[in-house]
């Protein structure tokens, strides 16, 4: 709505000057013609929007801005959901769930759907009862319904995609996630159990029943369980001053060529980074920092 308000201000400020200049030009070119200049008219929809803005009325619940031209502040709840979705996409493993944020936006979606229905109904009533300039309120209500629906679709997409990504991680590493149920909601834990039972029945019927019993014991060993690739490199932003131990990045080198060298020849693995720094680093090196909220994963 900020762009609409700016447009209305420009029209209101520029229209009188344009009319006055047009009138002077007409009188200069035709001094004997005393007919008044034709004034440009503001579209009815914009005029109605200006009147409603000046009177402080809105289609949605809430108070009018305390000061005209007040800067638009970001929605903290929406930013939290966006960050939750972005980090889940960028993280190679399952992130801790935030059921409170998800539940809040599900409730907001229901409220927005009711708002859209109310705006569309109001638009139909105005168009049926009024014509001409009186129909401006109906046109504005329809416009507000479209804007609200765009915001609703954007939020709904993030919620659905967040659930899709988490379900994919649960399915791809089901056995590994059995030890990470503290990061899941009750619904996700129930889904994991049901999915695990179905997969186990399928494997027993197709493969396991045809294997020796001794081979079954090795299936539960850690090296036999498929786990996320924590050595994947990620793009991140530092939120607090941190120190990163990158010794894990050089584990293979230390076990090989560097094993017989003195400590002074080894690479300094402790790196300090200030707030606001952007890094491309192995996820294993910043895993705890991400979980503590000191580093934010980006796409």
Image: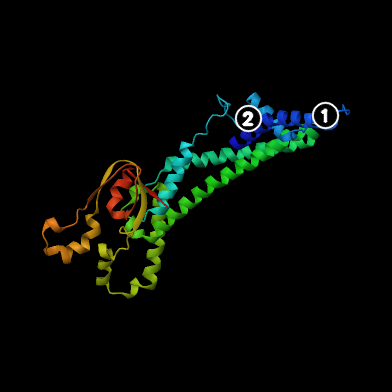
The spot of residue 299 in percent (x, y) is: 42, 52
Please, which colouring scheme is shown? rainbow
> Separation of disc 2 and disc 1 at Cα?
43 Å
In this picture, is 175 found above or below 39?
below
Question: Which of the 4 image quarters holds residue 169?
Answer: bottom left
Tally of marks: 2
Q: Quadrant of the N terminus?
A: top right
Give the labeled residue for mark 1: 27
Q: What element carries label 1?
A: helix
Residue 178's disc number = none
Percent coordinates x, y for residue 31 in the rendering: 86, 28
Q: In the figure, 196 relative to 162: above or below? A: below
Q: Is residue 259 left or right of residue 287?
A: left
Residue 298 is situated, as x and y percent measured from the top left of the image, at 40, 50
- Is 164 in front, or is 54? 54
* Residue in the foreground of this view, choosing between 147 and 40: 40
Task: Tell me which residue sits at (64%, 31%) in the image.
Answer: 9
Q: In this view, does 270 lie to the left or right of 129?
A: left
Q: Residue 58 carries which label?
A: 2
Q: Establish if 224 lies above or below 210.
A: above
């Amino acid at each position: 709505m900020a762009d609409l308000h700016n447009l209305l201000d420009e029209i209101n400020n520029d229209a009188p000057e344009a009319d006055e200049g047009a009138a002077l030009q007409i009188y200069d070119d035709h001094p004997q013609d005393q007919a008044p200049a034709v004034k440009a008219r503001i579209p009815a929809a914009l005029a109605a929007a200006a009147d409603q803005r000046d009177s402080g009325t809105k289609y949605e619940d809430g108070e009018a801005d305390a000061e005209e031209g007040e800067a638009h502040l970001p929605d903290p709840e929406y930013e939290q959901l966006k960050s939750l979705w972005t980090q889940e996409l960028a993280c190679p493993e399952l992130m801790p769930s935030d059921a409170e944020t998800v539940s809040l936006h599900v409730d907001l979606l229901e409220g927005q759907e009711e708002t859209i229905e109310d705006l569309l109904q109001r638009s139909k009533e105005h168009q049926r009862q009024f014509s001409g300039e009186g129909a401006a309120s109906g046109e504005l209500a329809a416009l507000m319904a479209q804007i609200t629906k765009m915001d609703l679709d954007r939020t709904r997409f993030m919620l659905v995609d967040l659930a899709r990504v988490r379900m994919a991680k649960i399915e791809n590493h089901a056995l590994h996630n059995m030890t990470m149920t503290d990061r899941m909601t009750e619904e996700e834990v129930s889904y994991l159990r049901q999915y695990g039972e179905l997969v186990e029945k399928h494997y027993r019927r197709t493969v396991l029943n045809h294997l020796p019993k001794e081979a079954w014991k090795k299936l539960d060993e850690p090296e036999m369980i498929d786990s996320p690739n924590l050595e994947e490199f990620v793009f991140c932003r530092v939120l607090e001053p941190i120190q990163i131990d990158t010794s894990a990045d050089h584990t293979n080198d230390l076990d090989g060529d560097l094993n017989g060298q003195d400590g002074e020849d080894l690479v300094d693995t402790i790196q300090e980074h200030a707030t606001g720094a952007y890094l491309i680093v192995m996820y294993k090196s910043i895993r705890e920092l991400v979980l503590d909220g000191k580093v934010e994963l980006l796409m």
